[in-house]
Amino acid sequence: MKFEGSEMLIIFSSLIILMVLMMMILIYVGFLRKKTELVLQKQQNELKFSQELALSQIEMREQTLSYVGRELHDDIGQKLSVAKMMTNKMNATLQPDVQVLAKELSELLSECITDIRNLSKTFNTDQIEHVGLIDSIEREVQRIEKLDFITVRFVFNSHDIDINPKHALILFRMVQECLNNVLKHSRSKKLEIFLDDGDESLDIRIVDFGVGIPKNLATEGSGLRNIKNRASIIKAEFLISSELNEGTEIRIVYPKK
C-alpha cells in the first residue's frame, strides 16, 4: 500500500509540474504573440504616419505648383499679352526697317505666352485632374520637344484611363519627375514613353539611351526618393534598370484593383 501511495504521489506531482509547465508555456506564447502584435501595430502606425506625412508634403507641393501656375497664367501671361498688343499698336508708326524688328518681337512674345500657358497647365492640379493622364503627358512631351535637343516617342494603348483622378495626378507627377531627370542627367538624344492600360494594372515605362544612372544615385538620389514616396502612397511598384553608357529604363506599375 505504501508503494502504491508513493506512486500516486509521484504521478500527482508529475501532473502538477506538467500543468505548471504547460501554463508557463501558454503564458510565454501569449506574451510572444502580444509582443508580435504590438511590434506589427507599431510598424503599421509608423508606415501610416510616413504615408500621411508624404501625402501632406505632396499636397503642399501641389498647392504651391497650382499657385505658381495661376500666377504664370493670370499675371505674367496677361502682362505679356499687353506687351504684345502695345508692340502691334506701335508697329504702324514705326519705320519699315524697325517694323520688321517689331514683328519679330511680337512673334517672340506670342511664343512666350504660349509656353507660359502650357507650363501653367502642367503646374495646375485641377487642370491635370480634368484633362486626364494621357493629355497631361502629351502636353509634357510637347514642352520637351520644343527644347529641340531630344526626340520623344509616346506610345499608349488607351486614351481614357479609368483610375482615381488623385492617383492619376500622382502618376503624372512621377512621370514628370522622371522626364525631368532624363533631361538633366541622361544626355540622351532619344526618349521613349510606353503606357499599357490593362484590366488589372497600368504599366508605364520610360526609356532613355543615355549615360545611365550610377548605382549610388539609383538608391540615394533625392528625386528618386520623392518618386518612390509617391509610389508607396498609391501602392504602385517603381523599378529602375540602368547600365552605364547604355541608358535607363524606369517602370511604374500601378495596380487598378
Image: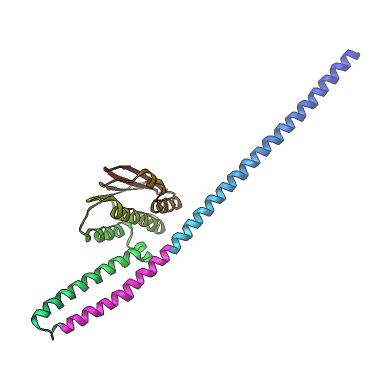
Q: Residue at x 32, y 67 (%)?
A: 120
Asked if 70 appears above or below 152 in the picture, the reply is below
| Residue at the extreme right of the image, as rendered | 2
Q: Residue at x 26, y 76 (%)?
A: 80
Near-viewer residue (214 or 119): 214
Q: Quadrant of residue 31?
A: top right
Q: Is residue 229 left or right of residue 149?
A: right
| Residue at the extreme left of the image, as rendered | 96
Near-viewer residue (162 or 59): 59
Is residue 198 shown to the viewer in this render? no
Q: Which range is magenta? A: 61-90
Asked if 174 appears above or below 115 in the picture, the reply is above
Near-viewer residue (125 or 60): 60
Q: Residue at x 48, y 60 (%)?
A: 56
Q: Quadrant of residue 242?
A: top left
In reply to whether residue 80 is colored magenta, the answer given is yes
The number of numbered badges drawn on the structure is 0
Q: Main secondary structure of the magenta part?
A: helix
Q: Residue at x 57, y 51 (%)?
A: 45
In reply to whether residue 120 is colored magenta, the answer given is no
Near-viewer residue (1 or 180): 180
Where residue 199 appears, x then y in whole percent? Answer: 36, 46
Where residue 65 appears, x then y in whole percent? Answer: 38, 65
Where residue 208 appears, x then y in whole percent? Answer: 27, 48
Asked which colour scheme the image uses, the reply is rainbow
Is residue 148 shown to the viewer in this render? yes
Asked if 227 appears above or below 24 in the picture, the reply is below
- The quadrant of the picture occupied by the N terminus is top right
Where residue 195 appears, x then y in whole percent? Answer: 30, 49
